[in-house]
Amino acid sequence: MTIINETGVTMLAFFASPPDVNDWEDDILGDEVIQSYSSFVVNFDDGRCRCIYDFRAVFANDFADDDVVIRNKINVCEISTYRYD
């Protein structure tokens, strides 16, 4: 799946976890970031045979603490692109 950042702000971290997992799993971006108007390819084939994930994206914010955007129950088996705008 391609994660596209069209927010005008750098995405600092991206997490995807099945809804029944209590904590967010590791930052998928690792040491990378997704600059504004850029994209990043994520492979969700982790051997768990899951299609539904919750997403958590952390964006840089010059005026306060980082902004967090959570999206629930995204079906990664049905879509190939997810856009933040």
Image (cartoon, rainbow, N blue to C red):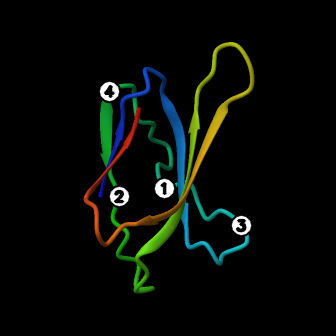
Q: Could you tell me the amino acid type at mark 1?
A: Ile
Mark 1 vs mark 3, CA separation in Å: 14 Å
Mark 2 vs mark 3, CA separation in Å: 19 Å
Asked if the residue at tag 3 contacts the one at tag 1, i.e. Cβ–Cβ closer than 8 Å, the answer is no
Badge 1 local density, few (<14 within 10 Å), some, or many (20+)?
A: some
What residue lies at 25% left-to-right and 59% top-to-bottom?
80
What residue lies at 67% left-to-right and 30% top-to-bottom?
66
Asked if residue 71 is positioned above or below residue 35 in the image, the reply reads below
Question: Which residue bears the numbered disc 4?
Answer: 37
Q: The residue tagged with tag 1: helix, strand or loop?
A: loop
Mark 1 vs mark 4, CA separation in Å: 18 Å
Asked if the residue at tag 2 contacts the one at tag 1, i.e. Cβ–Cβ closer than 8 Å, the answer is yes
Asked if residue 17 is positioned above or below residue 34 in the image, the reply reads below
- Residue 13 falls left or right of residue 75: right
Question: Which residue bears the numbered disc 2?
Answer: 42
What residue lies at 50% left-to-right and 50% top-to-bottom?
30
Question: Which of the two discs, 3 and 4, labels the residue nearer the N terminus?
Answer: 3
Asked if residue 3 is positioned above or below residue 12 in the image, the reply reads below
Quadrant containing the C terminus in the rendered view: top left
What's the mark number on residue 23? 3
- Provide residue 84's location: percent of width, then percent of height: 42, 38
